[in-house]
Amino acid sequence: MQGEKMNNVISILINSIKYEICGQGEKVVLPEISARFLIEVYKLSKAHDMAHLVGDALNRSGVFERLPDDIQENERAAIAKVKDKFDKQIFTAVYRYENINYELKRLKEMLEEAKIAYIPLKGSVIRKYYPEPWMRTSCDIDIFVYEKDLENAISVLVEKRGATLEEKGSHDVGLILNGVHIELHYSLIESDIVGKADIPLQNVWNYAQQIEQTCQYTLSDEMFYYYHIAHMAKHFIHGGCGIRPFIDLWLYNRVNSDNKDKRNKLLSDGGLLKFAGEAAKLSAVWFNNEEPDATTLDMENYILQGGVYGTLEQHLAMSQNKKGGKFKHLMSRIFLTYKEMSIYYPSLKKYPILFPFYQVRRWFRILFCGGKKAAMNEIKLNQGLSEEKKQAAKRLIDELDL
């Protein structure tokens, strides 16, 4: 899809979000009423986990009810199939929310009963700023606990609720409970975080306030904002972060915007002041009708191409710039650093002498346990990455001080 048509698809996506979430704009009007155009809108919105919002906006705008009389029956049938796809995404979003919300309530009850201090993170918090909570989709429940309470929290979930324990990572432990993924964070510092962005995250509990007569804590405005930006930046530099964090940012700033000095202090300490400013500008371009500049246009293009989690190609473009070229990126993927290896093998923190052994073990798993195809695909993409893609990534890194 090229040029004007792609711009029209993007416009429908953004206008639908504005109509649905921001309480702005008139009902959505399509520049072209055809199944082919609608399927392109669906593909882009689904790639960003926004199909439920776009579908609801189209339904509320009466797009599917007021089709022109001259549309033929086969085209009407094709359009109806696209509507079914959107409606399925709406149903799925509502179901996901109800399921996650139920398990979150039960999780809180169990942590309260066990007297374990906890802080809800990400979607569990930001959801309340949306017009309807189901509109803010998420794949899991994120809860932060003290590292000293981690084993007790795991025991409560596994023994009392029958959760399935996954492998422990460098900053969290994953569990599956009734089909819902739970991430118990004991640190907000991730090994692949951007630059010095981990510095303000070393003392998160210093920014927590207890909710009266409960074990639940909430992050201060400046720390909640900082963590949101740091998480965005991490995904951004590794291939893309999607539209959703910008909606979160816009909605949060609409209600909480009087604490700029404290926010900027943390952002400056973490080297993310420039990125945060440009992210806020892009959210204003999308949802406040402000004029874009060269940087926000570059960001928009990068984000829209990447979908929710970015693409491998965009990740490679960023990595080649950060590492110093194709060969150095390849070597960095073959020989992971100790810090990176600790993500996959947390026991390395206790037994660093095993570092060479785990390097060999990782290579063995890649070659003989199902990772070879993905590794070869990455090598191929790395070698074939165009100079244009690499330069576009470099421009963003420079513009955003990443």
Image (spheres, rainbow, N blue to C red):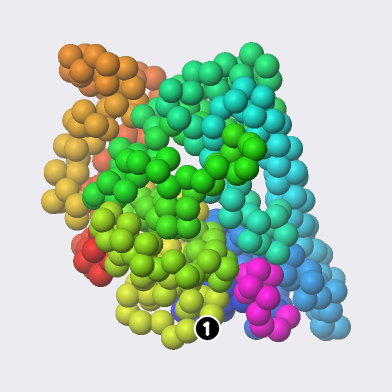
Q: Is residue 353 left or right of residue 160?
A: left
Question: Whole-percent x and y of residue 218?
Answer: 54, 46
> With respect to residue 77, does 239 lie above or below?
above
Q: Nearer the viewer, residue 105 or 260?
A: 260
State which quadrant residue 247 falls in.
Answer: bottom right
**Residue at (23, 36) in percent of width and height:** 333
Residue 228 seen: no
Q: Can you say which quadrant of the picture contains the C terminus?
A: bottom left
Q: Amino acid at mark 1?
A: Asn
- Rendered location of residue 161, percent (x, y): 68, 20
- For the point 48% across and 57% down, the residue is 221
Q: Which quadrant of the view contains residue 268?
A: bottom left
Q: Which residue is mark 1?
A: 289
The one of 294 and 171 positioned closer to us in this rendering? 171
- Reply yes or no: does residue 64 show up in magenta: no
Q: Residues within 10 Å of mark 1 (few under 14, many from 20)?
A: few
Q: Nearer the viewer, residue 114 or 154?
A: 114
Which residue: 29% across, 67% down?
Answer: 274
Residue 24 in magenta stretch: yes
Q: Is residue 246 visible?
A: yes
Q: Position of residue 276 (x, y in %)?
A: 37, 65
Looking at the image, residue 229 lies above or below residue 391: above
The residue sitting at 69% across, 70% down in the picture is: 20
Residue range highlighted in magenta: 16-27
